[in-house]
């Protein structure tokens, strides 16, 4: 099974998860939007900084994806 890579911005953190409503994430999501599902495991990344596994959550009210990090999966890319 393919693990999709989606950009995230560490500044878009609500204390539990990252918003994927930022331009870089939206660009990565666009070609795979029809394949994403609630609870899906993905790899979120900040280029040349870090990446980690996260579980997708969909906010139906705001039509936006969120990524909840999986503990112990952060990898520094520096």
Image (spheres, grey):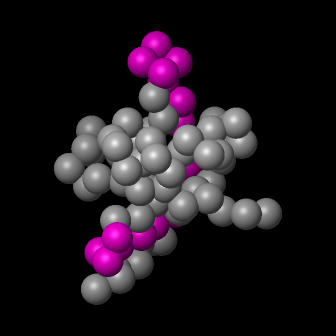
User: Residue drawn 37% across and 50% down?
Assistant: 24
Query: Foreground residue, 64 or 23?
Result: 23
Residue 16: horizontal and vertical position, in percent? 34, 44
Q: Is residue 3 above or below residue 30?
A: below
The furthest residue to the bottom:
78
Q: Is residue 61 magenta?
A: yes
Q: Is residue 20 above or below residue 61?
A: below
Q: Is residue 70 visible?
A: no
The furthest residue to the left:
11
Q: Quadrant of residue 52?
A: bottom left
Report the magenta residues as a range. Answer: 47-63
Q: Is residue 46 visible?
A: yes
Q: Is residue 46 magenta?
A: no
User: Residue drawn 45% across and 28% down?
Assistant: 64
Residue 78: horizontal and vertical position, in percent? 28, 86
Classify residue 4 as left or right of residue 63.
right
Residue 62: horizontal and vertical position, in percent? 42, 18
């Amino acid at each position: 099974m393919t693990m999709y890579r989606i950009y995230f911005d560490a500044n878009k953190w609500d204390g539990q998860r990252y918003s994927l409503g930022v331009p870089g994430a939206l660009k990565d999501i666009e070609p795979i939007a029809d394949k994403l599902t609630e609870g899906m495991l993905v790899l979120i990344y900040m280029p040349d900084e870090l990446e980690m596994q996260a579980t997708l959550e969909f906010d139906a009210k705001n039509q936006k994806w969120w990524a909840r990090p999986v503990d112990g999966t952060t990898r520094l890319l520096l």
